[in-house]
Amino acid sequence: MKRKITLKQIARELDVSISTVSKALRNSAEISEDTKQKVQAFAKLYNYRPNNIALSLKNRKTNTIGIIIPEIVHHFFSKVIRGVELVANNRGYNVIIGLSNESFSKEVINMDMLANGSIDGFILSISKETLQLQDYHHFNETMSQGMPIVMFDRVVSDIKCDKVIVDDLNGAKNAVKKLIENKCKSIALITTKDYVSVGKLRTQGYLEALEEHKMTPKADLILKIDDTLDYKVDLEELESEIEQLFKSNKKIDGVFAVNELYALSAMKVARKLGLDIPNDVQVIGFTDGVLSKHSTPSLTTVSQHAQHMGEKAADLLIDKLENEINEDADEEYQTVIIATDLIERESTK
Amino acid sequence: MKRKITLKQIARELDVSISTVSKALRNSAEISEDTKQKVQAFAKLYNYRPNNIALSLKNRKTNTIGIIIPEIVHHFFSKVIRGVELVANNRGYNVIIGLSNESFSKEVINMDMLANGSIDGFILSISKETLQLQDYHHFNETMSQGMPIVMFDRVVSDIKCDKVIVDDLNGAKNAVKKLIENKCKSIALITTKDYVSVGKLRTQGYLEALEEHKMTPKADLILKIDDTLDYKVDLEELESEIEQLFKSNKKIDGVFAVNELYALSAMKVARKLGLDIPNDVQVIGFTDGVLSKHSTPSLTTVSQHAQHMGEKAADLLIDKLENEINEDADEEYQTVIIATDLIERESTK
DNA sequence: TTTTAACACGAAAACGTTTTCGTGACATCT
DNA sequence: AGATGTCACGAAAACGTTTTCGTGTTAAAA
């Protein structure tokens, strides 16, 4: 049950000063070869490692970044984390994680808990409740204290900071175009309420695709789900809403859904109503999830490249952190847009 | 771009000493009401927060725990994280995350990176490569430096530390018993090589269940997959191995698989061979994944209560951390066993 | 008036580093 | 021999806290 060894202990043991030990370990030219050898050997023997906390305090730099996400049991977000962790580790940073559970207050508390010196900067995706309340004071306060933020996926234009987003508009547009090319005449959209920024953009993509092909969007083909707390809305209700959609629009032959759950539910309902996929109805979902790959039939998706988003966000943040040291007043914020890919599987022709 | 305000700055501004400010903020009786009010008001105005790093250094306690897992894009592990984060946050701890990617060296590097004072203790699940190499020096070194470790799920008896495991043996046993009760006469097992501790235990459960029902295990009904790197073994090969299993044992009417991927692949192959689930073949998987719930037919599973495991592990670790302060020499290690539940869905009768 | 006690505050140490600066002991150059 | 330089090391400050201890001032007690 020994504690970790410190410079002070080595110094005492070897009967030299703390400074000498420190310099010897960092191979300073100030120290004689003899002493260096002696100190280094001793340090190695006792497996000395500089205490990171002390370094953080001295350098006013923790080499740790915080990531706040709404949910972790989720393929998109866990892939983002994987990306963040990957580049963070490569560039010598640790990653501390906070879950908001889509709750405004947990988001605030989490940020407070970290913004007191524990980390150098944030990577985050805004919770649904925050988006709904449109209360962004915690982001602004954090940034005004000199702590950079990089937002990804769920972003908001009111906040000026670096951002990494997926090309929601074009991704959706291309997906819907695909359906149109595949001869779908009556394409339904299953989306979220407009306060979810990505939902709004995907809806817009849907509309633009129709427009470009001179198809008139019909309001009753658009189902906007109020998922105040996603995944908690019980499946039953979701499915019955979708069933309603199908029943009041018998001619639906294509569905574009903005997330995996909606897409799969649509397929389930369609099957239940005796519709064949992809022959009667074709379905595309905007998702990176695994369910899509393993469902029967497997789902054609718009891939979001989640891991790449995480990597990009981490690079952006660390770049900012390291440049901040050299030059300041570099108040240019970037928004990186990640292109999507259409991954065709069995749910389309 | 102002930095965070410190005690020193407040002291200078209010023309008192640092100690006075500190005491005033902590409501010490030593300080007069007047000064307290003045200091507290000022601190509130400038949104003063004690710097966590400085506190960590002073108290030799970071209030941060590290969690090292083999993979994060995985329902089991992400649920565990959710559990850890939940109780950690409730008890005032942060969570720093490290991914080993099933690699021994990344596991070592990750632990090294954190064991230098950044955290107070570890929660971890051992990587497959480490299990294979049976090289556990990094765990022992870490613990010998006074840093506690709690292992979960993938544990190893060579290491003396707190552990949280799922009741793999009985979980598997009950699942297989269920198949037997459902009149299965020829039950196949799809498992991993034995160096994966949980795979081994689940295999043992399978055998014990058969034994209790006087059924003789047949070697050619047991398929041990060598997933040196799970999920990277391409699906094709996995499926062909399973197909082989079915073809050389036409009478298989039950399958017990030790993870989600194997179970789903078995269902896929069975369907491909014209077998109906659950009428011709019944399938149970040892998994907590979502695929099971959404597959067609949905998969009967042995639930591992991943989130609960995470919560338990965090509680165990924090208990140890906080008791260490009061009483020491409490060298009793606990192993918590989490009971499993059989969640019956459509893949069994 | 002198002693004592309460009060309100400041100085300083400690946590573990790194780094700047100062200095004593030599050796080298005129 | 005196001036100068090099070498090898130590003292101390700084990062931001908390806490122990000491101390000057004032009011109460003797």
Image (cartoon, coloured by chain):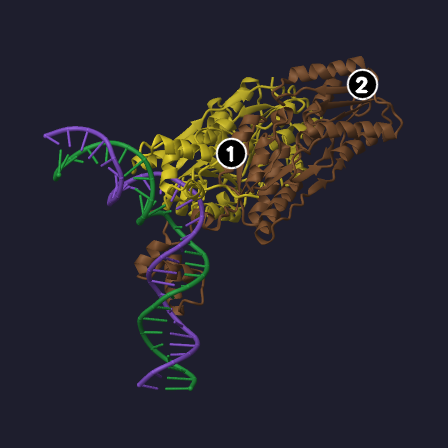
Chain colours: A yellow, B brown, C purple, D green
Q: Quadrant of residue B248?
A: top right
**Element at label 2:** helix
Please say if C30 is above or below A124.
above
Residue positioned 43% across, 44% down in the render? A12
Residue B174 horizontal side relative to residue D20, left or right:
right
Q: Nearer the viewer, mark 2 or mark 1?
A: 1
Instruction: Locate the N terminus of chain B and report the quarter of the image it occupies.
Output: top left
The residue that mark 2 highlights is B219
**Element at label 1:** helix
Sequence order check, earlier mark of 2 and 1: 1
Q: Amino acid at mark 1?
A: Asp
The residue that mark 1 highlights is B112
Chain assignment, label 2: B
Is residue A222 at least partly visible in the picture?
A: no
Q: Name the residue at the right extreme.
A: B214
Q: Between marks 2 and 1, how big is the CA–CA gap? A: 43 Å
Q: Position of residue B39 (x, y in %)?
A: 37, 62
Instruction: Locate the C terminus of chain B and report the quarter of the image it occupies.
Output: top right
Q: Position of residue B208 (x, y in %)?
A: 82, 29
Residue B269 horizontal side relative to residue A103, left or right:
right
- What label does residue B75 carry, if any? none
Is residue B167 at least partly visible in the picture?
A: yes
Chain assignment, label 1: B
Please say if A162 is above or below A290.
below
> Which of B13/A346 is in front?
B13
> Which of A265/A232 is in front?
A232
Q: Position of residue B13 (x, y in %)?
A: 30, 58
